[in-house]
Amino acid sequence: MQSINDNSDEHVSDGTGNNLLRALNASDLALLQPLMEEWHGEMGAVLFSPGESVQHVYFPCGPSMISFLVVLENGQSVETALVGREGAVGGIVSQGRLPAYARAEVQFSGLFLRMESAALERAKLQSLTLRHLFARYADCMVAQTFQAVACNGAHTIEQRIAKWLQAAMTRTSEHEVPLTQEQLAAMLGVGRSYLSRVLRSLKQRRILDTKRGRICVLDGEALSRLSCRCDESVRRHFEEVLSGVYPVEDESTAQRNPEFIAAE
């Protein structure tokens, strides 16, 4: 496997930093390994925009994450899916290079495995099991999108904020999420002033705090009680279709922040 990052972790080179790649059988993983390179994505990096030809497939590793954003006619961008180490972004099941519908943007910086879309197409022609696994992943992504639509229409901003922060904490195992209030408001599709009022209430209840460019979860258990159960529904579907791929919450992220306890 080619590497373009001198500081890469050893565990990334064999694909185990990405759960979807780890689900491949040995022969399929060996088929893909020579085609992949390590790529470091900085927060905000745009992988492709609406209408562009998708040239590469990206597999987030470890805490790295990508957001799918739909750009509305007024220029506002609303997040429709968050993809971490459980998945991939790019032409997973499409035949050939097709134009992108949404913008794919690095949400949390870090390491990714990247390969050319055309190379993946050639690999899929060689392996039926590879095609089947990626097709099952595409089904899971559709389920995630369906759930997001229902969540946006039925649940409160508090519940959606809690769900999003929980998803981020599960993938990073960190209590602090590098995200500004402006970014969170844009992704949720709500006004900044409305989001500020909701965050102020959560801060008064000592569930979270905000710093410059970061949101710090102080009480993960309270956040979990506040969250809707949409992420659990998506996780159950993943388990039925691709068992062991969806990230599992680290117990440490569900508890209270030790720094907060020390300050009480």
Image (cartoon, grey):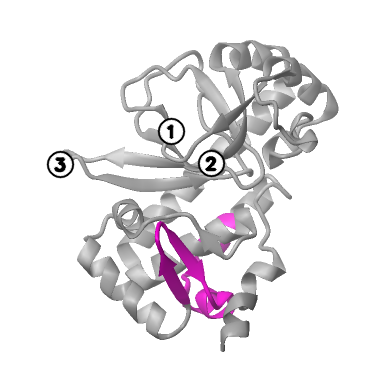
Nearer to the camera, 45 or 33:
45
Q: Disc 1, disc 2: CB below 8 Å?
A: yes
> Could you tell me residue 166's position as x and y percent?
54, 64
* Amino acid found under the numbered disc labelled 2: Ser
In the rendered image of this protein, does residue 216 appear above or below residue 234? below
Q: Say which residue label 3 marks.
A: 74
* Amino acid found under the numbered disc labelled 3: Asn
In the rendered image of this protein, does residue 240 appear above or below residue 27? below
Q: Earlier in the sequence, mark 3 or mark 1?
A: 1
Q: Say which residue label 2 marks.
A: 109
Q: Which residue is drawn at the image coordinates 59% and 14% (left, top)?
A: 121
Question: How far is disc 2 from disc 3 in space, using C-alphas?
Answer: 27 Å
Tell me where the magenta segment starts and ends, as one range.
208-236
Question: How far is disc 1 from disc 2 in space, using C-alphas?
Answer: 9 Å
Q: Which residue is drawn at the image coordinates 79% and 37% (left, top)?
A: 11
Q: Earlier in the sequence, mark 2 or mark 3?
A: 3
Q: Say which residue label 1 marks.
A: 45
Residue 233 visible in the displayed image: no
| Mark 3 crowdedness (10 Å alpha carbons): few <14, some 14-19, many ≥20 | few
Q: Which residue is drawn at the image coordinates 46% and 70% (left, top)?
A: 228
> Tag 3, which secondary structure?
loop
